[in-house]
Amino acid sequence: MSEKKIIVQKYGGTSVKNPERIKAVAERIKRYKDKGYSVVVVVSAMGKTTDELIVLAAELSKNPSKREMDMLLSTGEQVSIALLAIALHEIGVDAISYTGSQVRVLTDGNFSNAKIAGISTDRIHRSLAEGKVVIVAGFQGIDEDENIVTLGRGGSDTSAVALAAVLKTRDCEIYTDVDGVYTADPRVIKSPKKLKEISYDEMLELARLGAGVLHSRSVEFAKKFNIKLHVRSSFSDAEGTIVMPTEEMMEKFVISGITSKQDEAKITVRDIPDKPGIAAKLFNELGTQKIYVNMIVQSTGHDNRASISFTVKKDDLKRTIDICNTMNKDFGATAIEFKEDIAIVSAVGVGMQSSYGVAGKMFSILSEQNINIEMISTSEIGISCVIDAIYAELAAKVLHKTFIEAQ
Ligand code: ASP
Ligand code: MG
């Protein structure tokens, strides 16, 4: 086993998009090597390779075999690991690349969205002990029968964190095209702040609410194995954002991020019988049909009738309405309405657990702008409001101004 401190570094597609970028990555790895680290690197496919491979398959089939799609998509990462090894050799750094199958990234075998069950570290430790940089292909693994499977889009982050876990290191750097996690989307808010630290839970909440910088499963893994994720840019040396346990954070902001997303639609089932079992029936059926329901609000009933509003992904809207209409033969709702032009604006922060009045403040800020709140939902560390889509940007701006810029 190698005595040196192991660091896992993951480089995303933009960080290895061309030979110049690969050279820059190799130089960076060399610097870590020179500092005395044992470096394990995970890389994604170059640039938009994965998208291009998907387009290529689509030209041959509308419904390609899942096994062959994973076989195809895994090739992108195989190209980048080899090229990075070659670039390292060129600057005098001993390095070896491995595919997922070569280091036995064992998964549950679910094609296109597999979960990692284990990784064998023998080969990695041996190579590290020989002084080599070990480069592992991200996003891929195998099933029990050695079929190649992939981990879902953006899955290389999860490969990296899983490696950090099995190699028992807390140090995992995720190099991407942004230099950290910001308090808001810079396309909406002019100068959001870069967070020095953020908790796993906040990161997961931000991802759920549309501000995904990392593959969610990688954050869940990091939380479970207590790994610190340093999200930073491969284009600069600036410190990024460290994703860490809440208890270790120096500063816990009441609100650390404002998000806004417009990929969901609202459905309202009006005046259904206010009695046990109705909601269960409807949502069980949606679940069976694999429709992901996000917010659910039920109005207080009158005359033994109540209305339920909920949101689903816009892509699932048509199927959801069809299901509601079919179920309604039993329910006798007076109407099934839907609205597509909605936005879900949210405020997220661990500090809100220990402070009062955050919800009230959020509603006041929106009402001062005459923005009507159509639905509300809360979690331990987040408050979300459904509003009309035309106010999405304005809402994000005023919330950011009051909660973050004035904080
Ligand atoms: N290359 C894969 C993708 O584009 C995996 C990754 O980038 O993490 O989704
Ligand atoms: Mg990627």
Image: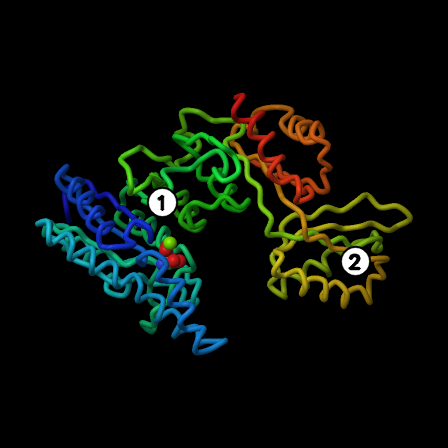
3D distance between C-alphas at marks 2 and 1: 43 Å
CA neighbours of label 2 inside 10 A, class few (<14), some (14 to 19), many (20+): some
Q: Is residue 116 visible?
A: no
Mark sitting on residue 336: 2
Identity of the residue drawn at 33% across and 65% down: 74
Q: Earlier in the sequence, mark 2 or mark 1?
A: 1
Classify residue 3 by image quadrant. Answer: top left
Q: Please tell me in which quadrant of the rendered image residue 287 appears.
A: bottom right
Which residue is at 41% across, 67% downward?
A: 54
Q: Is residue 358 above or below residue 282?
A: above
Other residues around mark 1 within 10 Å, as few (<14) / some (14–19) / many (≥20)? some
Visible residue check, residue 180: yes
User: What numbered label is drawn on residue 5?
Assistant: none
x and y percent of residue 398 in the render? 60, 29
Report the residue marked by disc 1.
177
Q: Nearer the viewer, residue 139 or 168?
A: 139
x and y, in percent, of residue 192 in the image: 47, 31
**367 w.r.t. 304: above or below:** above
Disc 2 residue type (three-letter): Ile
Above or below: residue 77 compared with residue 348: below
Label 2: state its secondary structure. strand
Outermost residue to the top = 406
Quadrant containing ligand 2 reads bottom left
Tell me the amino acid under the disc marked 1: Asp
